[in-house]
Image (tube, rainbow, N blue to C red):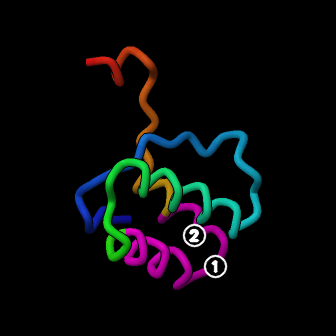
Amino acid sequence: MENKIGKTVNLELIGVDGNAYAIMGVFSRQARREGWSQDEIDQVLEEAQSGDYDHLLSTIMTYCEPQDEEEQEE
């Protein structure tokens, strides 16, 4: 999966409700907090929804890069 936007959000999906709508909601909220435009968020969600559940997970994970607290402070 290619990251077409060139950005990632600081989000760890482990522990997130496995429901597709919950995953998209968590991603959208975090992306907004990190200053993503609505167009960028919509592009990711549109791609995520263009296939099955595995495709959705793969797409969202492509745009998530969890950072530990030490990395965030730098």
Image disc number at residue 52: 1
Q: Are marks 1 and 2 in contact (CB under 8 Å)?
A: yes
- Position of 74 with respect to 22 (left or right) is left
* Residue reaching furthest to the bottom: 50
* Residue reaching furthest to the top: 70
Q: Is residue 63 above or below residue 66?
A: below
- Position of 66 with respect to 72 (left or right) is right
Q: Per the image, is 33 magenta?
A: no
Question: Magenta residues, as a range?
Answer: 41-59
Q: Position of residue 33 (x, y in %)?
A: 43, 49
Q: What is the three-letter code of the residue carrying label 2?
A: Leu
Badge 2 local density, few (<14 within 10 Å), some, or many (20+)? many
Residue at x-position 69% and y-position 69%: 21
Q: What is the three-letter code of the residue carrying label 1?
A: Asp
Q: Position of residue 41 (x, y in %)?
A: 40, 69
Residue at x-position 57% and y-position 82%: 51
28 vs 18, nearest the viewer:
28
Image disc number at residue 56: 2
- Position of 50 with respect to 70 (left or right) is right
Q: Main secondary structure of the magenta part?
A: helix
Q: Position of residue 29 (x, y in %)?
A: 53, 56
Image disc number at residue 34: none
46 vs 61, nearest the viewer:
46
Q: Describe the element under mark 1 as helix, strand or loop.
A: loop
Q: Per the image, is 45 magenta?
A: yes
Q: Is residue 65 above or below residue 58?
A: above
Q: Position of residue 10 (x, y in %)?
A: 43, 40
64 vs 26, nearest the viewer:
26
